[in-house]
Image: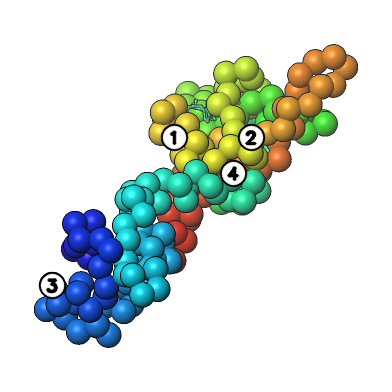
Amino acid sequence: MIVDIVKKNEPITSEQIAEKLNLTRSALRPDLAVLTMLGVLEARPRVGYFFTGKAVDTLISEKITDIKVDEIKATPVIVKESTSVYDAIVTLFLTDVGTLFVSDDEGNLQGIVSRKDLLKTAIGNTNTHQIPIGVVMTRMPNIVTVTPEESAYEAARKIVDHQVDALPVVKAVIENGQEKYKIVGKVTKTTITKLFVELGKN
Ligand code: ADP
């Protein structure tokens, strides 16, 4: 209501806004402080309040595109392609994660294994000790990744668009004339949920 009043009557003093809302000026003070801090309103001394043209929605979207993957990324659990399906399942329990990343000895991304990839294998095979995850994982180049410079919004959008739980955070490097992707972190549905809670707190 305050924003609407300012939009229609700018410049308008806090006394005039308070009057229109049947409130005292002091009751209005915290709201006006928040709106000016957010950049929705601008207060000019001895003139009054102006609407800056920024909607709250725009401010929220600016905020989540300002936050970079580098600031929110979590530690990935990385295993080798030769790890057995049995050991991969044990690793899921021990590390309390849902997705494992698979790398070569240099830490370059090779694959990704989800809970259901492992369940699917375990349900049809009795000897999960004998099956390497290399045969059940989703392999490069079919992996959706993010870079540390991309925004939190971009990462969340990729998770939703590709219907996956986790994205490896990678840095591209050239090794022996070949482009490789070093795993430097992960962004998962949990990472995004934690960020959402953090933003809500503030
Ligand atoms: P779950 O299968 O446990 O529901 P996901 O939805 O993340 O977990 O995985 C669905 C499928 O997509 C699995 O086969 C998995 O290997 C694959 N997958 C998981 N993450 C990615 C990713 N970032 N890029 C490409 N494929 C992925």
Secondary structure found at label 1: helix
Q: Answer few, some or many: residues within 10 Å of disc 1's Cα (few below 14, many 20 plus, some between 14 and 19).
A: few
Q: Is residue 41 left or right of residue 5?
A: right
The kind of residue tagged 1 is: Arg
From the image, tell me which residue sits under label 3. 20
Label 4 and label 2: CA atoms lie apart by 7 Å
Q: Answer few, some or many: residues within 10 Å of disc 2's Cα (few below 14, many 20 plus, some between 14 and 19).
A: many
- Image location of residue 31, percent across then percent down: 30, 72
Eye-nearest disc, 2 or 3 = 3
The kind of residue tagged 2 is: Thr
Q: Earlier in the sequence, mark 2 or mark 3?
A: 3
The structure residue drawn at horizontal position 64% and vertical position 19%, both measured from the top left corner, is: 140
From the image, tell me which residue sits under label 1. 157
**In the rendering, which numbered label is found on residue 29?**
none
Q: Answer few, some or many: residues within 10 Å of disc 3's Cα (few below 14, many 20 plus, some between 14 and 19).
A: few
Q: Which of 167 and 129 is in front in this view?
A: 167
Secondary structure found at label 4: helix
The kind of residue tagged 4 is: Val
- The quadrant in which residue 27 appears is bottom left
Q: Do the residues labelled 2 and 3 touch (CB within 8 Å)?
A: no
Label 1 and label 2: CA atoms lie apart by 14 Å
The structure residue drawn at horizontal position 58% and vertical position 37%, both measured from the top left corner, is: 150
Q: Are marks 4 and 2 in contact (CB under 8 Å)?
A: yes
Eye-nearest disc, 3 or 4 = 3
From the image, tell me which residue sits under label 2. 147
The kind of residue tagged 3 is: Lys
From the image, tell me which residue sits under label 4. 69
Label 1 and label 4: CA atoms lie apart by 12 Å
Q: In this view, does 128 lie above or below 37?
A: above
